[in-house]
Image (spheres, rainbow, N blue to C red):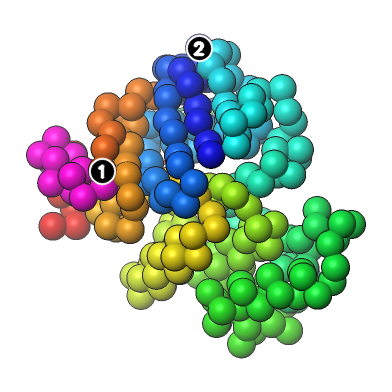
Amino acid sequence: MLEVKNLAVHYGGIQALKGVSIKIQPGELVAMIGANGAGKTSLLRTISGLVQPASGEVFIDGKLANKIPAHKRVAFGLAHCPEARRIFAQQTVHDNLLLGAFLRTKTEKKADIEQTIDEVYRIFPRLKERNTQLAGTLSGGEQQMLAIGRALMLKPKILMLDEPSMGLAPVIIDEMFSVINKIKATGQTSILLVEQLAFRALQVADRGYVLEQGVIRVEGNAKELLKNPQVKAAYLGVTH
Ligand code: ATP
């Protein structure tokens, strides 16, 4: 579904990724954990085409994507929810979701798009309650939900979430992880979840990778990573 092979990314003299290889199977939820500056955001930005790698390959749905520009990768079924929530503040919640389906509006019936909106509202009942509210007046957590809901409007095959819990209150973080579980349960989208909250991310994930200074140090089944002494010491200490 998604594969990167030997990805290297440089910013001037800084080498952010030093030969990263990962694989995500259809319907899988994969967590990418690592400290600040480990290269997690660089990896997502390279997969989505916003950063050009110095070497290595990105395959989306089996197709080599290196030469495909970012906006066209979206049409391949790749949705990227970056750390900064870029919602349209002056539009309503409902219109933000409709705008999320822009690529589908030319080829699909309005009824199909409305059906996806209903599916998104089922995952995020809070957004349904606030469907006529201007997005800029939503709370931070609700804006984060809207950003994810909008990405789902494209019916992506792969959803990449960059630190969805960032800046949210603990109770909203719980809601966020339950939403991620619900998206996984639909079975329609593979998810690459970048998270600082390693324990929470590994609890919902099927598999995980630990990225340190641009290198994958550990990978494996999420339940095994939760028990791995190296991972526990470095990333799970705070939550235990
Ligand atoms: P965080 O969790 O703090 O967001 P991260 O794991 O996502 O960290 P990246 O943002 O990918 O890490 O950064 C990896 C390294 O690359 C860091 O040393 C960072 O300073 C550097 N870097 C990232 N973007 C740029 C850029 N546009 N120009 C120069 N250096 C950059």
Q: Does the magenta stretch include residue 159?
A: no
| Residue at (50, 70) in percent of width and height | 141
Q: Name the residue beneath numbered marker 2.
A: 13
Q: Nearer the viewer's eye, disc 2 or disc 1? A: 1
157 relative to 102 in the view: left or right: left
User: In the depicted view, which residue is nearer to us: 239 or 71?
Assistant: 71
| Residue at (53, 16) in percent of width and height | 56
162 relative to 148 in the view: left or right: left
Which sits earlier in the primary sequence, circle 2 or circle 1?
2
Q: Which amino acid does label 2 sit on?
A: Gly
| Magenta segment main secondary structure | helix
The label on residue 221 is: 1
Q: What residue type is labelled 1?
A: Asn
Q: Is residue 176 among what the camera can see? A: no
Look at the image and give the residue range highlighted in magenta: 222-233
Q: What element carries label 1?
A: strand
